Image (cartoon, rainbow, N blue to C red):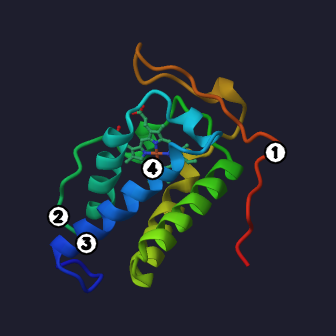
Amino acid sequence: MSDLNMTDEELKDWVSKVSTEFYEIVYNDLWFMKIFRNIKQEVITSQQTDFMVQALGGPKMFCGRSPKDAHPHIWIDEDMLDYREQLLVEAFEKVGAPQVLRDKWLKIDEAFKHVLINKGGPETCFKRGNADEIIYEPKPYYVRIKKAS
Ligand code: HEM
């Protein structure tokens, strides 16, 4: 039982529903999809589900890299984090996720933001291994970010 007042099975179901919808939105977004060009949608959906279930206090299923070590090759700034959050909120809405899950999820994301942001330009990125590509895709001027009201 997680501290969200749901069983582990319910938690896994909700997180899986949200992650599936979130990456469905990401992989159909003409800008954001570019950042995810080297990873398959089903792979990241399952990694993210395992990560969040564990972070939310459910069963320990995640055996991947920590957020800090997963993104050194991707240039990430505040605009990108805001945009990602906007897409995540769309996913919450679409699947009707419980409010308590939304709140905790956003809090966890918030806690990791400072380790993801690049303080300089793309030269501050580095590859995790030879197969990596440095991904530098700043927000194009025509992409709008809806500010929370
Ligand atoms: C704008 C912000 C973000 C972008 C653009 C982004 C993008 C990505 C991409 C492209 C990957 C796949 C990397 C690869 O293996 O090739 C990835 C992996 C991952 N991301 Fe993010 N991410 C962002 C924010 C976050 C946040 C806020 C979290 C969690 C708090 C997170 C957690 C993870 C995890 C757990 C993985 C998989 C780690 C692994 O097993 O390798 N990401 N992300």
**Measured Cα–Cα span from mark 3 to mark 2:** 9 Å
How far from the left and from the top, in percent, is residue 44?
Answer: 36, 42
Other residues around mark 2 within 10 Å, as few (<14) / some (14–19) / many (≥20): some
**Measured Cα–Cα span from mark 4 to mark 1:** 21 Å
Ligand 1 positioned in quadrant:
top left
Q: Which residue is disc 1 drawn over?
A: 142
Quadrant (top left, top right, bottom left, bottom right) of the C terminus: bottom right
| 106, above or below 85, in the image | below
Q: Which residue is disc 2 drawn over?
A: 59
**Measured Cα–Cα span from mark 3 to mark 4:** 18 Å
- Secondary structure at badge 2 equals loop
| Residue at 45%, 50% in the rendered image | 24
Residues at circles 3 and 4 in contact by the CB criterion of under 8 Å:
no
Q: Tag 3: residue type?
A: Leu
**Tag of residue 65:** none
Residues at circles 4 and 2 in contact by the CB criterion of under 8 Å:
no
**Measured Cα–Cα span from mark 3 to mark 1:** 37 Å
**Measured Cα–Cα span from mark 1 to mark 2:** 41 Å
Q: Tag 4: residue type?
A: Tyr
Residues at circles 4 and 1 in contact by the CB criterion of under 8 Å:
no
| Residue at 42%, 38% in the rendered image | 70
Q: Which residue is disc 3 drawn over?
A: 11
Q: Nearer the viewer, mark 3 or mark 2?
A: 3
Residues at circles 3 and 1 in contact by the CB criterion of under 8 Å:
no
How far from the left and from the top, in percent, is residue 132?
Answer: 45, 20
**Tag of residue 23:** 4
- Ranked by sequence position, the earlier of labels 3 and 4 is 3
Q: Tag 1: residue type?
A: Tyr
Q: Quadrant of residue 16?
A: bottom left
